[in-house]
């Protein structure tokens, strides 16, 4: 009886749902066809919003103004095919020209770009993405095209600017300069992000597709404020030399990583900082690049370079640099743990002074000096290290400075009977290379410890907004007597006439060096591994009037060499050679005819415009008004005389007396291949001036002197 009625109800529900579905479907069709324009307009009313506009990020520059990091503008091009004021006549006339120019800028075919325009026009798209990453120079050219010059309200074309962060000098100080990425900035990019970032602006924008937005107008509701430029303390030329010297040494000895830091003694300003790590690429080749700032972020057992702090603490506690220490045969046991000197197989150093202990880097002597001085008062040793300043961070403004591990209390759970003698030779302590350098720089700086700094000032355009003067961390690391003794000991290490561990390295150098070598075994989770070492050298120069300090650390070599004197110190020497050769402060002219009678400096023959600019900037008298592009130069005490240099149109130019750059320009433009030998000025050429040029490629030999 109930079955028919149930069936009827089911059919009734089915028919009802079908009718509702047809009504919904019909409404959808109505909205998509008849009412499409109305609802599209309503949608646009609700898709407009005030959007945040990122400002141009500030630049990071070297001390000479060279760009270390800069934001390069690129542009995306969108097109509003329903622009109310669209000039379709101009569009039809100019679209092919636009597609050709745009295709050349972004590497796309004009036909594919034309298809994008056609598709956007057919669909009535209000924000079609036509092209990405248009370079600034191409953007400028595109803006001059007739259709584009109509403006966004008559062409519908909108260029959206974005910033790409670039490091023009590649791996030079790459990790120190850092990376600008939204969620994980590093280096100066992170430490100075607030200053570099600027102030965000606001602009009225319209949603065009998905979550893409396009500005409604070119005007801002709130103008963005560009970020400040950060002027670093880095010397780009010195940075280049330090990086290259380090990389060559790492490759030569197949090291895992290495770092170099060069600091100005009186200010603590860092002039160069290089960090290179070994990588094996897919081809099997070995490459070194910067992927971690070991100088600031890697705290390791320093080994013998820590002996400076240990023996300084002994002398501050009353021991004299002339006091004797009996190192015996170079081998000793502390609590059944053996300690050796490097010459133990030759019988050791015997009884020597405390100064000699440092000079020859005796482990036994250093440990005995600390044990004798502090055995009954070990806390005084830890307190002494703290007063010197080696137990604290340097406080450099840089995210990621590693904490030094220098025990501050004998109640420390890791304190043992061995701790005193192990710490004496740079074990059971860790420091970063920068923290080690801070101590050595302080000894050079008359006992005043400076905070290392990477930034000297902030600028807005050419205006200096803020400066960062030198900052004193510790005005006196030790008394004057101790300081003089430490300076003397460090000089003895590098004295070519002495017995120090670095005595052969600086022989015949025009400058003197004070420093300390270091060699430390590498600890892993399984203890100290056999055959794995870190080599280091820390010091300053000139020893008699310190201007620069430097630390070098090279880790885990595979060449069989591992001592600081053979691995790290040569890098220090190469950097010091460069500084001495190029820093005018090391070279004075107080005698001789040039000092007594200033005259116009001589010059090679060459391009007239460059020579006139040079003499003009020097404020020196010179011939002007010549029409010739190339000139010959003769000088007297009062004037540089420029005379036209005849360059034949169809013959071999006379490049004798020119520098190599100008000679190459003229000869290669004449169709000659150039080989040369020597440096300096061209003294002779293998093909006589004026010789008719041949149609086939000819090689000319130049001799420079």
Image (cartoon, rainbow, N blue to C red):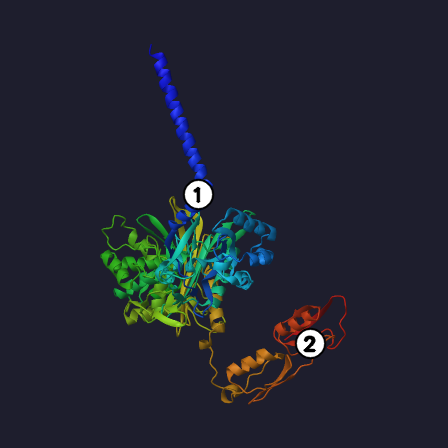
Q: Examine the rendered structure and indicate whether residue 565 appears above or below residue 26.
A: below
Disc number for residue 684 = 2
Q: Could you say which disc has been placed on residue 408 in the image? A: none
| Relative to 683, residue 561 above or below | above
**Tag nearer the camera, 1 or 2:** 1
Q: Residue furthest top?
A: 1
Tell me what residue is drawn at x 49 percent, y 52 percent.
82
Is residue 354 or residue 46 the one in the foreground?
A: 46
* Position of residue 11 measured from the top left corner of the image (x, y, whole percent): 39, 20
| Of 220 and 292, the residue lying toward us | 220
Q: How many labels does the image show?
A: 2
Q: In which quarter of the image is residue 647?
A: bottom right
Contact flag, marks 1 and 2 (Cβ < 8 Å)? no
Residue 698, percent from left and from top: 74, 67
Residue in front for this viewpoint, 343 or 165? 165
- Within 10 Å of disc 1 (Cα), the crowding (few <14, some 14-19, many 20+) is few
Q: In which quarter of the image is the C terminus?
A: bottom right
Asked whether 219 or 438 is in front, the reply is: 219
Residue in the image at 61% along x and 72% along y: 661
Give me the residue at 51% from left, 62% from top: 150
Q: Which mark is residue 35?
A: 1
Furthest-front residue in view? Answer: 34
Quarter placement of the N terminus? top left
Distance, label 1 to label 2, CA atoms, is: 86 Å
Give residue 663's quadrant in the image.
Answer: bottom right
């Amino acid at each position: 009886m109930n079955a028919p009625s149930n069936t009827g109800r089911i059919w009734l529900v089915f028919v009802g749902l079908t009718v509702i579905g047809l009504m919904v479907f019909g409404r959808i069709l109505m909205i998509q066809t008849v009412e499409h324009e109305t609802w599209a307009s309503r949608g646009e009313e609700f898709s407009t919003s005030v959007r945040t506009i990122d400002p141009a990020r500030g630049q990071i520059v070297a001390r000479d103004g060279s760009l270390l990091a800069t934001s390069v503008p690129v542009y995306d091009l969108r097109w509003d095919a329903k622009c109310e004021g669209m000039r379709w006549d101009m569009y039809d006339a100019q679209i092919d020209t636009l597609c050709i120019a745009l295709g050349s800028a972004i590497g796309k075919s004009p036909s594919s770009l034309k298809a994008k325009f056609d598709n956007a026009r057919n669909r009535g798209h209000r924000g079609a993405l036509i092209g990405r990453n248009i370079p600034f120079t191409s953007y400028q050219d595109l803006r001059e095209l007739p259709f584009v010059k109509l403006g966004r309200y008559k062409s519908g074309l909108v260029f959206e600017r974005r910033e790409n962060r670039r490091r023009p000098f590649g791996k030079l100080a790459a990790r120190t300069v850092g990376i600008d990425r939204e969620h994980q900035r590093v280096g100066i990019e992170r430490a100075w992000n607030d200053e570099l970032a600027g102030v965000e602006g606001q602009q009225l924008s319209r949603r065009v597709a998905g979550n893409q937005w396009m500005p409604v107008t070119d005007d801002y509701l709130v103008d963005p404020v560009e970020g400040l430029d950060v002027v670093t303390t880095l010397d780009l030329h010195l940075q280049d030399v330090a990086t290259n010297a380090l990389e060559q040494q790492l490759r030569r000895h197949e090291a895992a990583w290495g770092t170099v830091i060069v600091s100005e003694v009186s200010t603590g300003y860092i002039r160069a900082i290089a960090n290179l790590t070994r990588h094996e690429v897919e081809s099997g080749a070995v490459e070194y690049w910067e992927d971690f700032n070991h100088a600031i972020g890697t705290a390791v057992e320093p080994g013998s370079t820590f002996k400076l702090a240990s023996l300084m603490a002994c002398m501050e506690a009353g021991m004299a640099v002339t006091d004797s220490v009996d190192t015996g045969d170079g081998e000793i046991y502390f609590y059944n743990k053996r300690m050796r000197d490097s010459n133990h197989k030759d019988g050791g150093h015997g009884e020597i002074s405390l100064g000699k202990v440092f000079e020859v880097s005796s482990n036994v002597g250093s440990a005995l000096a600390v044990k004798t001085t502090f055995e009954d008062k070990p806390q005084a040793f830890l307190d002494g290290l703290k007063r010197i300043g080696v137990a604290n961070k340097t406080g450099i403004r840089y995210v990621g400075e590693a904490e030094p591990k220098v025990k501050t209390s004998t109640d420390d759970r890791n304190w043992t009977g061995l701790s005193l003698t192990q710490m004496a030779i740079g074990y059971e302590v860790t420091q970063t290379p920068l923290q080690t350098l801070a101590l050595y720089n302080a000894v050079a700086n008359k006992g005043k410890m400076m905070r290392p700094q990477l930034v000297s000032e902030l600028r807005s355009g050419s205006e200096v907004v803020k400066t960062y003067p030198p900052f004193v961390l510790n005005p006196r690391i030790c008394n004057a007597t101790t300081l003089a003794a430490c300076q003397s000991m460090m000089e003895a290490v590098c004295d070519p006439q002495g017995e120090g561990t670095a005595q052969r390295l600086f022989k015949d150098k025009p400058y003197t060096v004070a420093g300390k070598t270091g060699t430390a075994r590498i600890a892993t989770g399984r203890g100290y591994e056999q055959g794995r070492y870190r080599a280091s050298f820390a010091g300053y120069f000139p020893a008699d009037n310190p201007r620069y300090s430097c630390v070098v650390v090279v880790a885990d070599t595979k060449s069989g060499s591992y001592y600081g004197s053979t691995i790290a110190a040569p890098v220090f020497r190469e950097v010091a050679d460069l500084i001495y050769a190029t820093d005018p402060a090391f070279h004075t002219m107080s005698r001789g005819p040039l000092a007594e009678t200033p005259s116009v400096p001589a010059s090679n023959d060459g391009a007239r415009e460059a020579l006139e600019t040079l003499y003009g900037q020097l404020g020196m008298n010179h011939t002007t008004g010549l029409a010739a592009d190339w000139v010959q130069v003769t000088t007297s005490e009062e004037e540089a005389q420029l005379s036209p240099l005849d360059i034949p149109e169809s013959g071999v130019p006379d490049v004798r007396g020119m520098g190599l750059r100008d000679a190459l320009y003229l000869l290669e433009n004449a169709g000659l291949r150039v080989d040369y030998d020597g440096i300096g000025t061209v003294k002779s050429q293998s093909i006589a001036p004026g010789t008719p040029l041949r149609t086939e490629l000819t090689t000319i030999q130049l001799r420079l002197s």
